[in-house]
Each structure stands twice: as C-alpha cells, then as structure tokens.
Image: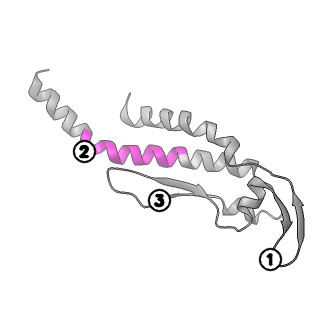
Amino acid sequence: MDAKEAAQQIASLGRVAPAKADIALGRAAVEYQGKVTLRAPYDTGNYSRSINAARAQSSPMVPRWSVGTNMPQGPRLEYGFVGTDSAGRTYNQRPQPHFRPNLKFVGPALERELKKMLGA
C-alpha cells in the first residue's frame, strides 16, 4: 500500500468512526442500564423501569449517552437519606447503591464494543 492509499483508508475511517463510536457507546450504555436495573431496589417495579439509556445532546464528532432515572427517589435510593423531608416525614433510609457499583463494567464494555465496531 502506498501513501496515497493509506491516506484514503484513514480518511474513510475518519468519516465512519464517529457513527461507529456512537453505536458502540450506545451498546455499552444499554449494557450498563441492564446491570443497574438488575441491582436497583424493587418494590412495585416503577423505579427500576424508569432507569433508561438515552443519547444525550452531542455533536456528530463527540457521541454522548446518559443512563439514569427521572424518578425523584433515585438519589435517595443510591445514597440513602436521613432526616425529615418537605412533607414532614422522617427517614433513616440506608443507601442501596446500584449505579456506582456497576460503573466498573462500563470501560470494558465500551472497549469490547469499539473493537467490534472498528475491527480492532
């Protein structure tokens, strides 16, 4: 392969890499979501069903994904809560971490997905 062919291959990869990286990041985010959901406290199932993975605002060159919940009890369940809330109810709720313990799986999942997508 000469320099011109190498440059063409690099340019071609440069055009498809951001889209493939976005797909890989999305797959890793969905895997993380699944692990968080499995470890989430379960009462009625509403909270665990609220945990989702979604593409966050990003540019075409910088993909971003978010995994979280829109339920107000999310931080209390993750970190615990001791005190009186705005309704006057007193709590001594222990932490039930489900997001943080699963962060260790994001890097390996993303690396695996990027290797699949980019053929490395």
Q: Residue at x 43, y 61 (%)?
A: 57
First in residue order: circle 1 vs circle 2: 2
Please provide the residue range marked out in magenta.
Answer: 14-28
Residue 46 located left or right of residue 26? right
Q: Amino acid at mark 3?
A: Ala
Quarter occupied by the C terminus: top left
Find residue 86 and name its label: 1
In the depicted structure, whether residue 15 falls above or below residue 108: below
Query: Is label 3 in contact with label 2 (beta carbons under 8 Å)?
Result: no
Task: Give SS at disc 1.
Answer: loop
Q: Residue at x 37, y 30 (%)?
A: 119
Residue that carries the numbered disc 3 in the rendered image: 56
Find residue 15 and name its label: 2
Q: Residue at x 49, y 49 (%)?
A: 26
Tag count: 3
**Would you say the magenta stretch is mainly helix, strand or loop?**
helix
